[in-house]
Amino acid sequence: MSLMRRIERGQTDEGEASSKNGKATGSVDSGNNSDGARISGAKSRPIASTPKRQKGSYMELKNRVQNRLLAELDPSIDISDVNGVRGTIQELFETILTEENIVLTRPERLRLFNQIADEILGFGPLQPLIEDKDITEIMVNGYKNVYVERLGKIHRVPMTFESNDHVMRIIDRIVAPLGRRVDEQSPYVDARLPDGSRVNAVIPPISLIGPTLTIRMFSKDPITVEQLIEFGSLTKESVEFLSACVKANLNIVISGGTGSGKTTLLNVLSTFIPHDQRIVTIENAAELQLRQDHVVTLETRPPNIEGNGEITAQQMVVNSLRMRPDRIIVGEIRSGEALDMLQAMNTGHEGSMTTAHANAPRDVISRIETMTLMAGYELPIRAIREQISSAIDLIVQVDRMRDGSRRVVNITEIVGMEGDIITLTDIFQFEQSGFEGEKIVGQLRSTGLRPTFVNKIEAAGIHLPPSIFGTSNRRGIS
């Protein structure tokens, strides 16, 4: 996208938004020329040579320099070449400081340049947080309050936006390239960053504290199964078992609460899918990071400003059946698409996977029953449960523990029906043994029970050693 396009969307014009709030911006064109004239390359009005930082605030200085830099920067420049554009911006920046006789120390000069470059090329004050590899969540509660999750703990960071308008400009910058919108008619939106990180924004009148922004950061380098073992989320035995289940085309649901690591685990399990299979993924905001070559990525579409053109996950699941998939992966089932997903699993698309919000394996069953009814069909509960028991083979429950760690706490088989009840059996279960300081100590252990689908795994040419299932004689849950 060209710089002109981004400026036309109001994503980089600091001066305009600041003037709406009644703040002095030191605009380079406070006369008759319009903003469009300034942006299109009109010559800026000379600024007094007295160092502005001695007269006003740091923010006024930033806005003055930034507005003049935007006026002199070629609006047709392609900002996709970030390094090249950053060099061009730095040259203009140094020239402007010299011409305006603005005296800054080296740290001040570096800070000012980084902030202006982030406003033009990145996501403003959020850019340093986005680039921090230790941050897993960014939470903006109005322009004054910014929090991050680092190593499982939430901390407030000493930074603010200039105003609520500034937050809105960053939100617009995120959602506009995706063809999505957020305004008073549609005051919340799901989106994603270019790296796949998940974004949710809520604005007034729904949010009473100003625009709020929540960003679930994804690792720049996808987490590997070896790292999950190192973190204690899984054990070698459970990984070997899950790998066999994926390769043997078992249908798997990953469940857990918000921020528990469902999508991360889904990404990891997808690495076990053979590379010669065709995979169709369906998501509300594309965030899966599958490494296979033959992957078709589909993304739902919200309605336009007239309320038309919406494409739901349920419609896309139905359409995906005509795309000759070997496997269908739905990022998350939330409503009526659960019924179509169950039917797909039962009609030759084995090995499909999805995630769902639930607190325990038994709760997953209840949630899928409810979501199936949301499809609009008056189906008997027993018929729905028979669909679930025949379609889904395995539930993998993940949990965000009190110490901030994410762990798999249950690997549970759906055995079948006993009367009107779906029977579940825990194959692996997390056992907590104590604490080391504030850190929870425990391990995912085998219950000693072999799943009934072992024959299916062996039919796929995979032989699991008996040691994986241990020697315990515990019974399953029902």
Image (tube, rainbow, N blue to C red):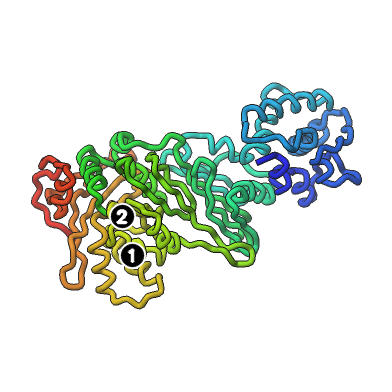
At 49% from the left and 48% from the top, the residue drawn is 198
**Which amino acid is tagged 1?**
Ile
Residue type at the position of mark 2: Val
Residue receiving disc 1: 368
Give the quarter of the figure containing the N terminus: top right
Q: Quadrant of the C terminus?
A: bottom left
Percent position of residue 417, x then y: 18, 67
Contact between labelled residues 1 and 2, with CB atoms less than 8 Å apart: yes
Q: Position of residue 105 (x, y in %)?
A: 72, 22
Which residue occupies the foreground of this view, 110 or 297?
297
The residue located at (37%, 47%) in the rendering is 261
- Density class for disc 1 (Cα within 10 Å; few <14, some 14-19, many ≥20) is many
Q: Residue furthest right?
A: 32
The correct choice, above or below, for 259 with respect to 360 in the image is above
Is residue 304 toward the left or the right of residue 195 in the image? right
Q: Earlier in the sequence, mark 2 or mark 1?
A: 2
Residue at mark 2 to residue at mark 1: CA–CA distance: 10 Å
Label 2 belongs to which residue? Answer: 253
- Name the foreground residue: 439 vs 448: 448
Q: Position of residue 333 (x, y in %)?
A: 39, 59
How many numbered dots are placed on residues in this image? 2
Graded by Cα atoms within 10 Å as few (under 14), some (14 to 19) or many (20 or more), the crowding at tag 2 reads many
- Residue 60 in which image quadrant: top right
Q: Is residue 430 visible?
A: no
